[in-house]
Structures are given as C-alpha cells and as structure tokens.
Image (cartoon, helix red, strand yellow):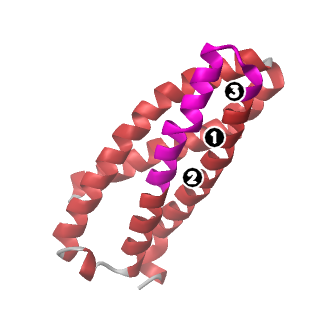
Amino acid sequence: MAIALSLHVLAAVIWVGGMFFAYMALRPAAASILEPPQRLSLWQSTLRRFFFWVGLAIIIILASGYWMISQQYGGMQAAPLFVHLMHGLGLLMMLIFLHVFFAPYRRLTKAINETRWPEGAKALNQMRILIALNLLLGLIIVVIASGGKYWLQ
C-alpha cells in the first residue's frame, strides 16, 4: 500500500505541479519577453515534453488508485465519499487532458509547422483556458486527498 500511495502522490505532484509552474511562472515570463512565433514554438516544445510525463502520470494514477481502492475498500462500492470525489474529478481531468492533446495541441503544432501564427495563438489560448480548469481541478483534488477523510465521511 505504501508503494502504491507514494507512486500515486508522486504522479499527481508531477502533473499538478507541472501545470502550476506552466501557468503561474512560464506563461507570464514567455508572454513578457518573447514574440508570438518564439512563444508559440516554446509552448509547443515544452508541452510535447510535459505531455509525455502527464501520460505516464495518468497510467500510474489509474493503476495505483484502482489497486489501493481494491485493497483498502474491496472496490468502489465501499469507498468513502472523498475517494469517489477524487476519482470523478480525476477522470474529468484526464478527459480534459485528452481533449487538449488531441484537439488544440494538434492545431497548435500544425499552425507552427505551417507558420500560421494567429491560428497557433488561438489554439494556445484554448489550451490555456483548459489547462487553467485542469489546474483548478487538480488543486481541489489535492485538498480532498489531504483532508477529505477528516471532513468528508
């Protein structure tokens, strides 16, 4: 159980922490010093690398989470409310990530490859909004994970 929990938390920290860094530090810095072509290329290259780690984090979160639920509660039917909330919000985050990856990120990459900067900026802005939503959901899950068993029985 300790290994599964450690892997679960590590994967969540990588994902949520990466979004926090990107949104709160990299985004404003890139916007203040880079012209649109360089900024879009930086984001595409950064996100390509980050999305690999998010994909790995998702696999680890799902595998460790379902294993812990089966070992500790015997399945979802016996799991407490805070586990159901983390599960549902986590699945929503994963769906948002898949949408970001397969829709606006692909449009961003295509726009950069074809040097269509306004279209790239539009795709990046769509991603910004969805990543902000995912960051908010991730932070809510962190609060639920750290205190939910005490106040959500």
Sequence-wise, the earlier of marks 3 and 1 is: 3
Image quadrant containing the N terminus: bottom left
**Residue 89 x %, y %:** 47, 64
Relative to residue 75, is residue 105 depicted above or below? above
Q: Residue at x 42, y 59 (%)?
A: 91
Q: Which residues are magenta?
A: 93-119
Q: Nearer the viewer, mark 1 or mark 2?
A: 1
Nearest the viewer among 146 and 71 is 71
Residue positioned 23% across, 51% down in the render: 3
Q: Where 145 falls versus 9 (above or below)?
A: below
In the depicted structure, whether residue 91 falls above or below residue 132: below
- List x then y, in percent, for residue 136: 61, 57
**Disc number lying in front (3 or 1):** 3
Q: Which residue is mark 3?
A: 120
Q: Describe the element under mark 3 as helix, strand or loop.
A: helix
Looking at numbered disc 2 in the image, what kind of residue is underneath it? Asn
Numbered-mark total:
3
Instruction: Name the residue: 31% across, 51% down.
Output: 6
Whichever of labels 1 and 2 marks the residue nearer the N terminus, that label is 1
Indicate the amino acid at tag 3: Gly
Q: Which residue is mark 1?
A: 127
- Residue at point 48%, 72% (across, down): 147
| 145 with respect to 74 (left or right) | right
Rendering coords of residue 17 (x, y %): 53, 44
Q: Is residue 82 left or right of residue 28?
A: left
Q: CA distance from mark 1 to mark 2?
A: 10 Å
